[in-house]
Image: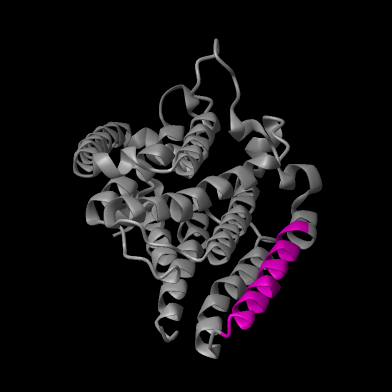
């Protein structure tokens, strides 16, 4: 069981399910049709492949005492095969998706293509994948900006891309612009806070590499009390104000508040060191829980 748990979380497969859960939450909260199983399969494979890429090839980081690095070193052959299978499934799925919806994709408005381009560019630059002769920039090395970039890419993928895919697969389904923007910003800030918490785990490595993340710049306690907690409280107040203004019921508001309250508790707990699995299970699990709470909360809103 422990081997399975480590494989599931160290191998980033849980991250793939988080991406699906957030995409489903976005569609449910916007009252749109869900994306197809084909799209979710592509999303899962692409997400796991993308996140695992950081632990392969020339981008390897972390010393021998890093449990996650030790796991990747021990299961290197398995991960290589997993990456190949994920890439093949995503590629075949992408080709099938293009064949099924080529006309709808071709006719997408220019604003959608602009959004897709920005998201792809951010994803590419995050690993510095552009050839050095073109432009050398690795967004992972941007210090305190890194967390906001991670949150931005996640929000774009699970909100904007999911919305665009709905239009491709099901025809034009209008969504309230204010609600779409609000959900995008909420996911952006929630994932950003999650990324800042993860930077606490990488404090020693980031400091040695002179990567000026929040925790390296300000220290552990100042990051918790002056950055994490204020961001979460602002998000909490904004959530209450927005849902109240839309006359959501107490149950719906309550379900949406649960992830923010737990996030405050987790941020407070960061004053003590935790094992890597705590971050992968509990902290990433909060994002998955946020999606579940958002989906369940919408069931108590009358059409």
* 2, 79: nearer the viewer: 79
Q: Is residue 298 above or below residue 231?
A: below
Please identify the quadrant where the N terminus is shown. bottom left
In which quarter of the view is residue 79 placed?
A: top left
Residue 246 on the magenta segment: yes
**Count of numbered circles on the image:** 0
Task: Kindly give the residue lying farthest to the bottom in the view shown.
Answer: 250
| Residue 132 appears in the picture as rendered | yes
Place of residue 95 in the rendered image (x, y in percent of width and height, measured from the top left): 22, 36
Q: Where is residue 295 in the image (x, y as percent from the top left)?
A: 41, 73
Viewer-proximal residue among 26 and 64: 26
Instruction: Kindly indicate the quadrant of the structure image that contains residue 301.
Output: bottom left
**Which residue is pictured at 50% across the width and 42% down the height?**
111
Q: Where is residue 211 in the image (x, y as percent from the top left)?
A: 69, 34
Magenta stretch: give its range: 227-247
Q: Is residue 15 visible?
A: no
Q: Is residue 200 magenta?
A: no
Q: Is the residue 213 above or below the residue 21 in the image? A: above
Residue ID at (54%, 66%):
179
Q: Is the magenta stretch mostly helix, strand or loop?
A: helix
Quadrant for the C terminus in the image: bottom left
In depth, the one of 223 and 22 nearer the eye is: 22
Asked whether, in this view, residue 126 is left or right of residue 296, the answer is right
Q: Which of 200 and 175 is in front in this view?
A: 175
Residue at 57% x, 50% y: name it: 151
Colouring style: one colour
Q: Is residue 163 above or below residue 98?
A: below
Residue 240, percent from left and from top: 65, 78
């Amino acid at each position: 069981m422990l081997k399975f748990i480590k494989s599931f979380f160290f191998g980033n497969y849980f991250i793939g399910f988080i991406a699906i859960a957030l995409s489903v939450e976005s569609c449910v909260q916007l009252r749109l049709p869900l994306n197809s199983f084909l799209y979710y399969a592509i999303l899962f494979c692409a997400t796991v492949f993308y996140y695992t890429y950081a632990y392969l090839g020339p981008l390897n980081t972390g010393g021998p005492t890093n449990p996650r690095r030790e796991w990747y070193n021990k299961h290197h052959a398995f991960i290589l095969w997993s990456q190949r299978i994920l890439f093949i499934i995503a590629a075949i799925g992408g080709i099938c998706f293009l064949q099924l919806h080529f006309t709808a994709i071709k006719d997408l408005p220019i604003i959608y293509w602009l959004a897709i381009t920005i998201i792809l560019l951010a994803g590419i630059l995050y690993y510095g994948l552009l050839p050095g002769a073109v432009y050398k920039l690795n967004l992972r090395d941007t210090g305190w900006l890194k967390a906001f970039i991670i949150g931005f890419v996640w929000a774009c993928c699970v909100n904007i891309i999911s919305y665009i895919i709905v239009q491709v697969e099901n025809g034009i389904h209008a969504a309230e612009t204010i609600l779409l923007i609000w959900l995008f910003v909420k996911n952006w800030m929630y994932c950003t806070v999650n990324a800042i918490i993860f930077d606490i785990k990488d404090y020693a490595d980031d400091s040695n590499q002179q990567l000026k993340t929040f925790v390296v710049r300000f220290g552990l306690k100042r990051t918790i009390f002056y950055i994490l907690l204020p961001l979460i409280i602002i998000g909490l107040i904004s959530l209450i104000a927005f849902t109240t203004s839309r006359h959501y019921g107490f149950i719906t508001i309550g379900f949406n508040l649960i992830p923010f309250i737990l996030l405050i508790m987790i941020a407070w707990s960061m004053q003590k060191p935790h094992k890597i699995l705590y971050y992968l299970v509990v902290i990433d699990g909060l994002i998955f829980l946020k999606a579940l709470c958002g989906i369940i909360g919408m069931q108590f809103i009358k059409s």
